[in-house]
Structure formats: structure tokens, C-alpha cells
Amino acid sequence: MAHISSLAMVFLLCVASSYAVNTVDVNTICKGVKNPSFCVTLLDSKPGENRDLVSLGLYTIDVTLANTTNTITLINMLISKSGGDAQAKHHYDRCLLHFNGIAAMLKQTPDFMKRGEYDTALQDAVGVRSHVRVCVSEDSDPHHPFYDSSELPIYANSVDQVAEVFAAILNHLNTPI
Ligand SMILES: *[C@@H]1O[C@H](CO)[C@@H](O)[C@H](O)[C@H]1NC(C)=O
């Protein structure tokens, strides 16, 4: 009996420590990203007590979604102001599709986090970044040399930067087998 309960105790300690591991220093999370000081500032700005990886991840999803909503508002404004400029309208219409796709994806990502499906959440982070890249990179397409002088590239870069931080957090979380 005593033997069984000590085994149970070891098991519980293992479970407890596998949860405790989910806290990683912010500087460690931010080491590999393009702009580490942006990453540290962002994660330090998370309100509330919880600083475990899942809480930080959920926070970066919220910020990415807020940035995406602002970007969609900007794109709608740019479309309404594009007037007779067919090339500009085409560009912004395409970007709107990409950012609507990002918003739809990010609304599901918190559920993957809560279920521990971190691989799927990482696919969302990668998906967000590739949607942003495709929207912005149309500018450098030699067949459509449209130069976007609006604020859209800056807004898009915000979304990409926060999504990169989210991906960096997920790199410290493994989906249980
Ligand atoms: C994105 O969110 C960050 C952090 O809240 C904010 O500083 C930045 O201005 C936002 N950018 C856009 C384009 O909404």
C-alpha cells in the first residue's frame, strides 16, 4: 500500500513539474526573433499575474487580432479612397482577403492553445505570417509594380512582428503525444 502511494506521489510530482516547465524567461523566448527588444517590451506589457507560456501565448494572439482588426479598418478606408485607381483597388482588395483570413484563423487559435494543440497553433502563426507576406510582397511583383505609399506596410509589419513572438513562444511548447 505504502509502495503504491509513493509511486502515485512520484507520478504526481512528474505531472506537476511538467506544468512548472511551462514558464520560460522572456529574454530566452525573445532571443531568436528579428526584433528582440520589441518582443521583450510586448511580453512585459501583458497585464495580470500569469506569465506562463500559454498565458503569454494567449496574450500575443489577442494583440495580433487587435492589430489585424486595425489593419482591416485601414484597408477598408484605403479601398474607399482608391477612386479610379484600379491597381490600388486590386492590391487592397487582395490584402483585405488575406487579413480577413488572418482574423478568421486567429479566432480559433485560443481553442488550440487551451486544448494543448500547440502544433496546430504554430501552423496558425506561420499562416498569419505568410498571409502578411503575400499581401505586402505583391508590391515587388515585377508584373504589377504597384508601390504602396499608404501605412498598410507598417500595419502589416506590426501583425507579422507579434505573430513572430507568438511563434517563438510556441517553440517552447510541445504538443503532448
Ligand atoms: C499593434 O499592437 C501593438 C501593441 O498593442 C501596438 O503598439 C501597435 O500600435 C499596434 N499596431 C497596429 C497597426 O494596430
Image: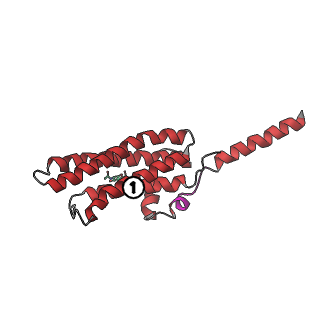
Write the start and end of the magenta stretch as one range.
22-29
Residue 45 seen from this side: no
- Reply above or below: 70 against 154: above
Q: Is residue 1 above or below residue 91?
A: above
Assign a secondary structure to mark 1: helix
Q: Which residue is mark 1?
A: 130
Quarter of the N terminus within the rendering = top right
Is residue 134 shown left or right of residue 6? left
Q: Position of residue 136 (x, y in %)?
A: 30, 59
Where residue 33 sits in the image (x, y, percent)? 47, 63
**Rendering coords of residue 127 (x, y %):** 42, 51
Q: Quadrant of the C terminus?
A: top right
User: Residue at image x 84%, y 36%?
Assistant: 5
On the picture, is 111 further left or further right than 19? Answer: left
Colouring used for the render: secondary structure
The x and y percentages for residue 65 are 37, 45
Say if the magenta span includes residue 76: no
* Depth order, front residue of 1/100: 100
User: In terms of depth relative to the viewer, which is nearer, 168 or 49?
Assistant: 168
Q: Nearer the viewer, residue 111 or 130?
A: 130
The answer, for residue 115, to whether it is visible in the render is yes
Camera-side residue of 21 and 106: 106
Identify the image quadrant of residue 41: bottom left
The answer to whether 30 appears left or right of 77 in the picture is right
Picture quadrant where residue 2 is located? top right
Instruction: Name the kind of residue labelled 1 in the image.
Output: Ser
| Up/down of 46 relative to 6, above or below | below
Q: Residue at x 41, y 40 (%)?
A: 107
Kindly identify the residue that appears in the image at 74 percent across and 44 percent down: 13
